[in-house]
Image (spheres, grey):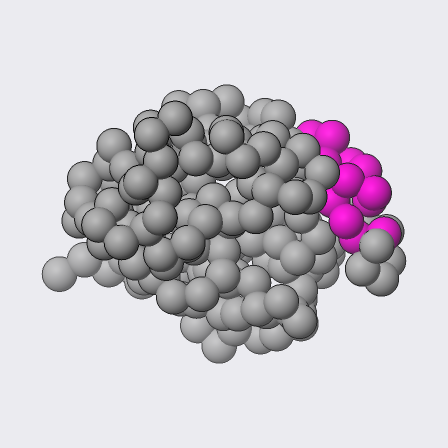
C-alpha cells in the first residue's frame, strides 16, 4: 500500500486549495499554493508531524501566495519553486493583484523552473508542465507515480481559469488544456486551485474546453 498522502485545505476568502503532499514514512511535506492563513497551515503541519521541505506555486496571484512568508519564517530551510515565466508576477504587487486586495505582497522563488523540469522533493518526484493562459507563467505539477496532477487555476471541475487578469490569455489557456492536459491519461486525478477534484477523463467528456477547435 502506498504511503503517499495529499491533504486539501481551502484557505482565504476565495477558498484557494492549499495542498500538503507527503509520504507517511518520511514526514517531509511539499506545500502547494499557500494562499492565506499561514498559522492554520502550520498548525496542520504540526498536527500531522510534518516538516515542510518545499513550497510549489502554480502561479503568482495573491490568493495563492499570501502565506509563503509565514511558512518560510517558521521553516527557513524551505525552498520555493515557481514557473520560469512567473517572476514578474511574483515580484509586482500590481500584477499579482495583492495591492488591489489589501496589502502589497511579493515573493522571491529559489527556483524558476522550465517546462519539463523534474523536482525531487520529500521523497516524491514532480514534473513541471508549462500551462500559460490563466497567467503567462502558470504551471501544473504532475506526480506521475501517483497519477496526480496539481492544476492550479488552469483546469477546474467542468470549468477553467479566468483570463481577464494581468497576463491572462484565453487562447493560451484553451491550448494549454487541450494540448498539454488533455493529452494525459484519462485516469489522472486532478487537484485544482479551487473547488473539487476531478479526472482528466471526466474533463475531456464534460469540460466546455473539449469543444474548442482552435
Q: Is residue 32 above or below residue 36?
A: above
Tally of numbered discs = 0
In this orientation, does residue 196 appear? Answer: yes
Seen as rendered, the residue at the extreme left is: 1
> What segment carries the magenta color?
87-99
Residue at 47% in and 44% down: 154
Residue 179, by quadrant, is: top left
Q: Is residue 32 above or below residue 212?
A: below
Q: Is residue 144 magenta?
A: no
Residue at 56% in and 63% down: 16
Q: Is residue 92 magenta?
A: yes
The location of residue 144, given as percent across then percent down, is 25, 40
What secondary structure is the stretch in magenta mostly built from?
helix
The N terminus - image quarter: bottom left
The location of residue 27, given as percent across then percent down, is 40, 60
Q: Is residue 70 above or below residue 201?
A: below
* Relative side of 171 to 70, left or right: left
Residue at 39% in and 26% down: 214
For the residue pair 118 and 94, the one nearer the viewer reads as 94
In this orientation, does residue 118 appear? Answer: no
* Relative side of 21 to 86, left or right: left
Residue 121, by quadrant, is: top left
For the residue pair 14 and 50, the one nearer the viewer reads as 14
The location of residue 117, given as percent across then percent down, is 43, 25
* Relative side of 151 to 12, left or right: left
Residue at 45% in and 60% down: 20
The location of residue 176, given as percent across then percent down, is 42, 32
Residue 21, by quadrant, is: bottom left
Amino acid at each position: 500500500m502506498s504511503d503517499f498522502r495529499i491533504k486539501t485545505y481551502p484557505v482565504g476568502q476565495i477558498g484557494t486549495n492549499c495542498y500538503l503532499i507527503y509520504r507517511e514514512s518520511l514526514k517531509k511535506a511539499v506545500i502547494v499554493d499557500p494562499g492565506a492563513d499561514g498559522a492554520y497551515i502550520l498548525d496542520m503541519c504540526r498536527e500531522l508531524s510534518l516538516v515542510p521541505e518545499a513550497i510549489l506555486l502554480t502561479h503568482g496571484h495573491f490568493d495563492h501566495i499570501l502565506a509563503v512568508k509565514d511558512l518560510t519564517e517558521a521553516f527557513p530551510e524551505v525552498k520555493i519553486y515557481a514557473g520560469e515565466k512567473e517572476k514578474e508576477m511574483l515580484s509586482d504587487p500590481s500584477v499579482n493583484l495583492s495591492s488591489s486586495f489589501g496589502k502589497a505582497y511579493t515573493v522571491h522563488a529559489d527556483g524558476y523552473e522550465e517546462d519539463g523540469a523534474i523536482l525531487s522533493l520529500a521523497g516524491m518526484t514532480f514534473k513541471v508542465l508549462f500551462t500559460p493562459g490563466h497567467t503567462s507563467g502558470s504551471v501544473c505539477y504532475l506526480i506521475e507515480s501517483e497519477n496526480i496532477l496539481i492544476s492550479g487555476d488552469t483546469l477546474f471541475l467542468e470549468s477553467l481559469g479566468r483570463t481577464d487578469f494581468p497576463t491572462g490569455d484565453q487562447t493560451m489557456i484553451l491550448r494549454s488544456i487541450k494540448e498539454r492536459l488533455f493529452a494525459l491519461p484519462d485516469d489522472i486525478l486532478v487537484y485544482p486551485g479551487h473547488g473539487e477534484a476531478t479526472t482528466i477523463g471526466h474533463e475531456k467528456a464534460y469540460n466546455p474546453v473539449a469543444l474548442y477547435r482552435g
